[in-house]
Image: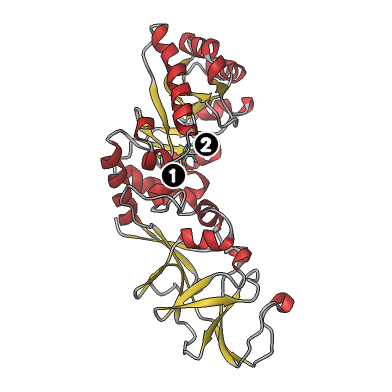
Amino acid sequence: MMPPAVGERPTRIRVDLANLAFNLRSIRAHVGVPVMAIVKANAYGHGLVPVALHLQAQGVEQLGVAFVEEGIALRQAGVNVPILVLGGIFGPQVAQFITHDLEITVSSLDKLRQVEAAAGQLGRKAVIHLKIDTGMERIGVHSYSSRAFIEAAVASPWCELKGIYSHLACADDPASAMTQQQLERFLEACGHIERIGAPMPLRHLANSGGVLHFPGTWLDMVRPGILLYGVQPDPASQCTVDVRPVMSLASQVVYFKVVKAGNPVSYGATWTPERDTRVVTVPIGYGDGYPRALSSRGSVLIRGRRYPIVGRVCMDQFMVDIGQDSAWNEDEVVLIGAQGTERITAEELAQRAGTIPYEILVGLNERIPREYHGR
Ligand SMILES: *Cc1c(COP(=O)(O)O)cnc(C)c1O
């Protein structure tokens, strides 16, 4: 890792853009259809704008974000590939979508009318994707009552119907029967477009789990998020696509001491050494999004060896027991990533913290500087 600039904290997220490009190529080769790269939530913690610009340079067909603000930030940064906003829309926001050339998820007949009204007022067509609910029960028109909705969208003079999509609820589990059922419901809804003789828009359904485990869901485009960042949606299932972790997270030892036997460490005095031991302090905590749930459960790498976090993770620091080994101030501490032959993955952190890798990645906040390497 590069030494920090003067005045910058030594804790940093390193984003490997070469691995990001590798993962995009790998997913593309696997599915053989265009990719909508999902960059919501600060590109899963990797940095919205730099990640999007790099994906654009790699020729990604489309980007997906959750909220209109994310799409506007991308446009303002000079991203010019098509961007779909995946979230539900509010009527007053629609004009913003159109003026920033953002594609709109239309998830009900009411919302279709709101989009038409705003587009008509601006005198500019809105580009829309219809959202069909096939079993997630989040947003979208139920597949079993989507005919009138589809007909209205096809007939709309102010909407260009670019896509139709749905979202999978259980795709990270290859054994779940839910995905096949959702696919059937989705294709049935799409079939109505054919029946009324309208041109078929882009049909897209697969998230990372779909990409990994359900080829039938790939259709005309796939929407991978976490897999693009080299992380498994469900670490328990087998990975069928060759991807590499894009993020690593490291800090430096800021303090060294000996803790005498019987003296507890950190808030709540929850951990006490049975014999004298060496303890180092690492300057990152839950205020950065490093989970407090890793108190006495997580581990870190120092000098190529794995050591346990002891006691509670604080807001800005935590302690590590290095036993009788040595470590010096400013030694590198790896929290996610490799050091020597050891590696700590986001998947491992999630498992130890009792959560999913998504929450680990997106939780790491803007207090941690990000540096970008490779191309
Ligand atoms: C977040 C999201 C995705 C990407 O999900 P991953 O599991 O990260 O691949 C795809 N589609 C929609 C609608 C989403 O909200």
Residue at (44% x, 48% y) in the render:
226
- The amino acid type found where label 2 is placed reads Ala
Task: Quadrant for the C terminus, please.
Answer: bottom left
Where residue 145 appears, as percent x and y from the top left, is: 56, 15
Q: Nearer the viewer, residue 166 or 111?
A: 166
Neighbor class of circle 1 (other Cα within 10 Å; few <14, some 14-19, many 20+) is many
Where residue 257 appears, as percent x and y from the top left, is: 58, 90
Q: Which numbered tag is attached to residue 363? A: none
CB of mark 1 near ligand 1 (< 8 Å): yes
Image quarter of residue 139: top right
Residue at (34% x, 27% y) in the render:
220
Residue bearing the label numbered 2: 169
- Viewer can see residue 265: yes
Q: Nearer the viewer, residue 69 or 13?
A: 13
Q: Is residue 3 above or below residue 230?
A: below
Q: Nearer the viewer, residue 196 or 57?
A: 196
Where residue 83 appears, as percent x and y from the top left, is: 43, 34
Task: Quadrant for the N terminus, please.
Answer: bottom left
Residue bearing the label numbered 1: 225
Residue at (41% x, 75% y) in the render:
3
Mark 1 and mark 2: span between their CA atoms?
14 Å
Neighbor class of circle 2 (other Cα within 10 Å; few <14, some 14-19, many 20+) is some
- The amino acid type found where label 1 is placed reads Gly
